[in-house]
Image: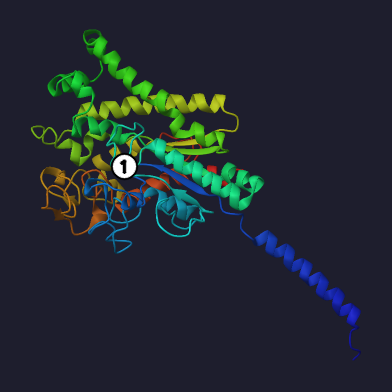
Amino acid sequence: MERPSSVFLILVLHVVLISTSCDSRSERPRKNVALFVFGDSFLDAGNNNYINTTTLDQANFWPYGETYFKFPTGRFSDGRLMSDFIAEYAKLPLIPPFLQPGNHLYHNGVNFASAGAGALAETFQGAVIDLKTQQSYFKKEAARLRSRLGEVEAKVTLSRAVYLFSIGSNDYTSIFLTNSSVLNTYSKPEYVGIVIGNLTATIKVRLSPVLQFLLSRTESYIDNHSKYFWQDVYKRGGRKFAFINLPPLGCLPGIRIIRPDKNSSCLEEASILAKLHNRALSKLLRKSEEQLKGFKYSLFNFNLSLRRRMNHSSKYGLKEGKIACCGTGQFRGVFSCGGKRTVKEFELCENPNEYVFWDSYHLTERVYKQLAEQMWNEASNSSMVGPYTLRDLFQSK
């Protein structure tokens, strides 16, 4: 049998190499879309481990992290957070905290969130990384990307990235947990009497001056600080944004116990502030979509989703919707989980997977996973997510 010529072999090899190269390009996954995370303890992956603060704003001790990581990471849960699952669904590694020591090559994104943070710098000032400071960290990271990748590739990376925000809860809960500036104007009984109620027409007429103060405070809070939410990121190339609205704040175990005479009810005045905030946020996002070219967003109805799990926990494979797994006192609402805070005594449930709440203010890994799945998969423009899902944002150009 005649041996093939060397020219023929070279031609065959060349065809095979071209074919293989084309196949590998077609099978090669798209370059990962980066995830940048801003916010509070619902998303903090451990930034507060590296700042000068107290254990009230840290979770770097047992039993935090006990189920998944088997050690505390600084996350306020028994395991992973919503942002961790979102990263997984987007085929990204865990997104690291910005302040974590080590090599800062954040090609897949970075987490700037800080437990206790608010949009207002005055919220737990000096103990947390407020949103404005988180934005300054993002500016540094954007500059690093331009330095490492060049202007063109950095611009592409930032424009394709998804920016996730959860902020505002602490701005409102701090009113009830500290001596806020609002309470310098009104005594606690006066303030509770003002904000409590159903905001009916009768109350509006009777309390119109004070009610107007509350409404203007909530809406101006959004308007005045919206630039810290996303406009600065937009100026640096960001186009795809995901927002988590505020939960029913008065139903968190740590807020519910503020009025212990009402054994089974939430602190309604706190939840009203959350509703006002959520309404204003939704309105402002729609306005931004109209005014900012290329602006896309996903808004997750955390409030409704959490209320459903609290009130119908068995429907979601859970057994307890109101009592926290870790803490002490009524509803285990005393923020003592881990015994490192003001109150040292705490109880720990046997199985966090049966609970909605992990500690006085935060959720279990199982619930965070359920919420992340909704954010990723729920039909867009449903009562839970819209106008885009997180999957939509990650897959869009």
In the image, 115 versus 337, the foreground residue is 115
Query: Residue furthest toward the top?
Result: 205
Q: How many numbered discs?
A: 1
Left or right, 280 with reference to 395? left
Q: Could you say where residue 91 lies in the image, as x and y percent from the top left? A: 51, 56
Left or right, 220 with reference to 90? left
In the image, 232 versus 307, the foreground residue is 232
Circle 1 sits in a helix, a strand or a loop, which is it?
loop
Whether 95 is drawn above or below 12: the answer is: above
Q: Quadrant of the C terminus?
A: top right
Tell me the colour scheme of the image: rainbow
Residue 135, can we see it?
Answer: yes
Q: Could you say where residue 276 lies in the image, as x and y percent from the top left? A: 33, 24
Whether 120 is drawn above or below 136: the answer is: above
Q: Could you say where residue 219 lies in the image, as x and y percent from the top left? A: 37, 21
Q: Quadrant of the N terminus?
A: bottom right
The residue positioned 51% from the left and 54% from the top of the image is 106
Q: Could you say where residue 84 lies in the image, as x and y percent from the top left? A: 41, 53
- Give the residue at mark 1: 128
Query: Residue furthest toward the left?
Result: 261
**Type of the residue with mark 1:** Val
Whether 367 is drawn above or below 169: the answer is: below
Rendered image quadrant of residue 352: bottom left
Neighbourhood count class around disc 1 (C-alpha, 10 Å): few under 14, some 14–19, many 20 upward: many
Left or right, 22 with reference to 102? right
